[in-house]
Amino acid sequence: MRHRKAGRQLRRTSEQRLALLRNLASSLIEQGAIETTEAKAKELRPFVEKLITKAKSGTLHARRLAGRHVQKRETADKLFREVGPKFATRPGGYTRILKLGHRRGDGADMARIELVER
């Protein structure tokens, strides 16, 4: 039974799932928008929004907490110098998911997740 089990498995172990979310989050922060499957985008949204909320405070403690998930120094710097201050006055909802249709190879539902412009 799946009672009270939140989140999607994405057919991965918990370690693989965490690594996937970390890599997707880093790509989203670096590029501003990425295309992935709809399920991955829906799982990525709360993961990234929590990182951006930490970046808004800009404290050393928040940087260390975000550093657990954003491994690259350049990406963490961009998160705290550009992305966090950009959303300083926004109370949440930093990302947008746009559905793109089906992938040609396997028919998976594709989506584009992007950072909202102010």
Image (cartoon, grey):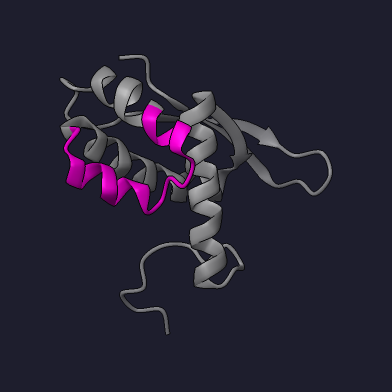
What secondary structure predominates along the stretch shown in magenta?
A: helix
Image coords of residue 21 (percent x, y)? 49, 52
Tell me: residue 117, above or below residue 103: above
Q: Nearer the viewer, residue 79 or 87?
A: 79
Question: What residue is at 56 percent from the left and 73 percent from the top?
Answer: 13
Q: Nearer the viewer, residue 87 or 103?
A: 87
Q: Which quadrant of the rendered structure holds the N terminus?
A: bottom left
Q: Which quadrant of the rendered structure holds the C terminus?
A: top left
Q: Quadrant of residue 76?
A: top left
Question: What residue is at 23 percent from the left and 40 percent from the top?
Answer: 54
Would residue 97 be counted in the magenta stretch? Answer: no
Residue that sits furthest to the right in the current view: 105
Q: Quadrant of residue 49?
A: top left
- In this picture, residue 81 sits left or right of residue 101: left
Residue that sits furthest to the top in the current view: 118
Image coords of residue 93 (percent x, y)? 28, 31
Count of labels in the image: 0
Q: Nearer the viewer, residue 74 or 6?
A: 74
- In this picture, residue 92 sits left or right of residue 35: left
- In this picture, residue 9 sits left or right of residue 79: right
Image coords of residue 109 (percent x, y)? 65, 43
What residue range appears in magenta? 58-77
Question: What residue is at 27 percent from the left and 26 percent from the top?
Answer: 84
Q: Quadrant of residue 31?
A: top right
Image coords of residue 24 (percent x, y)? 54, 43
Question: What residue is at 81 percent from the left and 38 percent from the top?
Answer: 104
Residue that sits furthest to the bottom in the current view: 1
